[in-house]
Amino acid sequence: MRYVFILLISSFLFSCNLSQPKSTDNNSVFKNDSTPDLGKIAQMKLSHTGDYRKTLDQLDQGNLSSLDVAGTLFKNCIGDTLTRDSMFVVFNDFYNTVAGSYLENNEIVNTQLQNSPSPGTLNKVKTSLAAYGFSLSSSEGNFYLEPQTEYLLQNFGSALSPAYHEFLTIGSKEQHTRFAEDGTILIPADSLTSRIMTWENFMIRYPDFISIKMAQDQYAQYMSAFLAGMDNSRVFNPESNRLNDSSKVSFESFIVKNPESKSTEVVKAYLDLLKTTNFNYTDKVDSFLLEKVYH
C-alpha cells in the first residue's frame, strides 16, 4: 500500500505580488516557455501561492533537480506562516506528482529498471532517490516510488506552522509501521485505536489547519477499519455475518478507555445499532459509516 498524500488548497489563500531580483525577468527564466533556467528560478523570491504553483508547473517532473529548485523557492518564500503553509501544500502536491510520474518521465532510469536489473543497478537508483526522500518499491514486477514524510519533516518542518509540523510528525511516525496492505490490517487493535485518538485530538487542536481534510480522511480510514474491518480483515464473520467476539470486546474496551472522546460517541452509537440486529451485519452498517464516519 502506498501512502500518497493528496493535499487540498484552502480557498482563503491570500494574494500578494511576485517579487524577483532585479537581474531576473520572466523572459530569461522561462525560455520559450519550455526550457526554464533553473539557476535563475532558484533565485526568485515569491510571496504568492499562485505564482509558486505556476513556476512549479514549468519544471521537469522527470528530473530530480526540479525538487531542489522547488524546495529552494519554498525556503525563499516571502510571507507569514499561513503563506508558507499554503506554499508547502503546493510543494507537497508537486513532490507527490513527481513520485507518481518520475519513472515514466525519466527514460534513463526507467530503462535501468527494466528486464531484471542487477543488485548494483538497483542500489544505485535507490541511493539517488533516497536523497529526495523516495523509496523504490515494486509490486507484481512494476516499480514505483514511495514519498517519505520524514524527508518533508526534516527538510521543511521548521519553516511551517506548529499545526503543519505536527501533521508531518504524526504522518512520519505512522509511515514507519504500515497500517494495511492488500485489504489486510497489519497493526493490532490497540495501535489502530491509538491512531484514531491521535487524529481526533489533532483535529480538535487545529480545526482551521489548512489541510484539515487530509487529517479527516486519515481519521475516517482508521475509524472505518476499526468498525467494519477491511476485505481480508473482517469484523463480521464471513459465514455467519455476525460480529466477531474479539471486535465486540475491542469496541467496549475503546469506550472504557476514551470516555470523553467524540470517537467514543460514534462507537457507542455503532454498538447500539448492532444490538438492534443481534450483532449481525446489515445494510444499516454501511449507512452508519457513511453518515457518522465519512460525512
Image (cartoon, grey):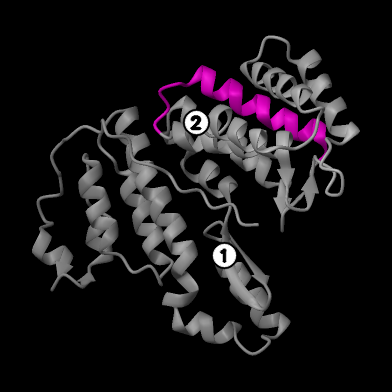
Decide: is 193 above or below 32.
Answer: above
Q: Is residue 191 magenta?
A: yes
Q: Is residue 45 visible?
A: no
What secondary structure is found at the residue carrying circle 2? loop
Q: Residue at x 70, y 46 (%)?
A: 176
Q: Locate residue 252: give its quadrant.
A: top right
Q: Is residue 276 magenta?
A: no
Decide: is 33 above or below 118.
Answer: above
Decide: is 53 above or below 292.
Answer: below
Q: Dot 2: few (<14), some (14–19), or many (≥20) neighbours within 10 Å?
A: few
In the image, taking residue 164 as reference, residue 188 lies left or right, namely right
Mark 2: amino acid: His
In the image, taking residue 182 as reference, residue 125 lies left or right, namely left
Q: Dot 1: few (<14), some (14–19), or many (≥20) neighbours within 10 Å?
A: many
- The quadrant of the image that shows the N terminus is bottom right
Q: Is residue 103 visible?
A: yes
Q: Position of residue 22 (x, y in %)?
A: 9, 51
Looking at the rendering, the stretch of residues picked out in magenta corresponds to: 188-210
Residue at far top of view:
260
Residue at the spot of label 1 = 145
Mark nearer the viewer, 1 or 2: 2
Residue at the spot of label 2 = 295
Q: Residue at x 22, y 39 (%)?
A: 47
Q: Position of residue 294 (x, y in %)?
A: 54, 34
Mark 1: amino acid: Leu
* Residue 14: numbered disc: none
Q: Residue at x 73, y 52 (%)?
A: 231
Q: Position of residue 52 (x, y in %)?
A: 25, 49
Residue at far bottom of view:
115
Dot 1 and dot 2 residues touching (CB under 8 Å): no
Q: Main secondary structure of the magenta part?
A: helix
What secondary structure is found at the residue carrying circle 1? strand
